[in-house]
Image (cartoon, helix red, strand yellow):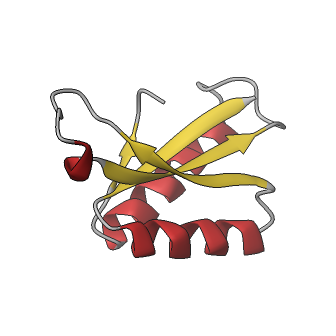
């Protein structure tokens, strides 16, 4: 199983992205509050969309790389980013 974390500064954007991914048949999607390194103030924490893909095992494989590129582009379009350390 591989995990992806798309991070956004706005909760509404994260929730919209999560809904879209669920509609695109990603069954394991949830919105979480993400405390990033160096952030002490809980109000400053970003919102993240956590996606688990059970069918992928190899992060270096072509399907996983393609999905990373897709999620990265989606996050950037919405003012966020893909956390590669997820």
- The count of marks equals 0
Task: Residue at 63%, 75% (x, y): give it.
Answer: 20
14 lies left or right of 2 = left
- Foreground of the two, 28 or 81: 28
The percent coordinates of residue 42 (x first, y second) are: 26, 43
Q: Image quadrant for the N terminus?
A: top right
Q: Residue at x 73, y 67 (%)?
A: 22
Q: Percent from the top left, x then y, of residue 38?
A: 15, 28
Residue 79, located in which quarter of the rendered image? bottom left
Q: Looking at the picture, how far across and down is residue 31, in whole percent?
A: 55, 55
Q: Position of residue 27 (x, y in %)?
A: 81, 56
In the rendered image of this protein, does residue 8 appear above or below residue 5? below
Q: Residue at x 20, y 50 (%)?
A: 44
Q: Horizontally, is 25 left or right of 47 in the view?
A: right
Up/down of 1 relative to 28, above or below: above
Quadrant of the rendered image containing residue 47: bottom left
Residue at point 23% right, 27% down? 37
């Amino acid at each position: 199983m591989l995990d992806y974390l798309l991070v956004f500064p706005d909760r509404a954007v994260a929730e919209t992205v999560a809904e879209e991914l669920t509609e695109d048949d990603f069954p394991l999607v949830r919105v979480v509050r993400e405390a990033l390194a160096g952030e002490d103030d809980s109000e400053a924490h970003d919102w993240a969309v956590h996606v688990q893909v059970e069918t992928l095992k190899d992060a270096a494989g072509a399907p996983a790389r393609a999905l990373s590129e897709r999620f990265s582009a989606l996050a950037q379009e919405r003012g966020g980013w893909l956390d590669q350390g997820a």
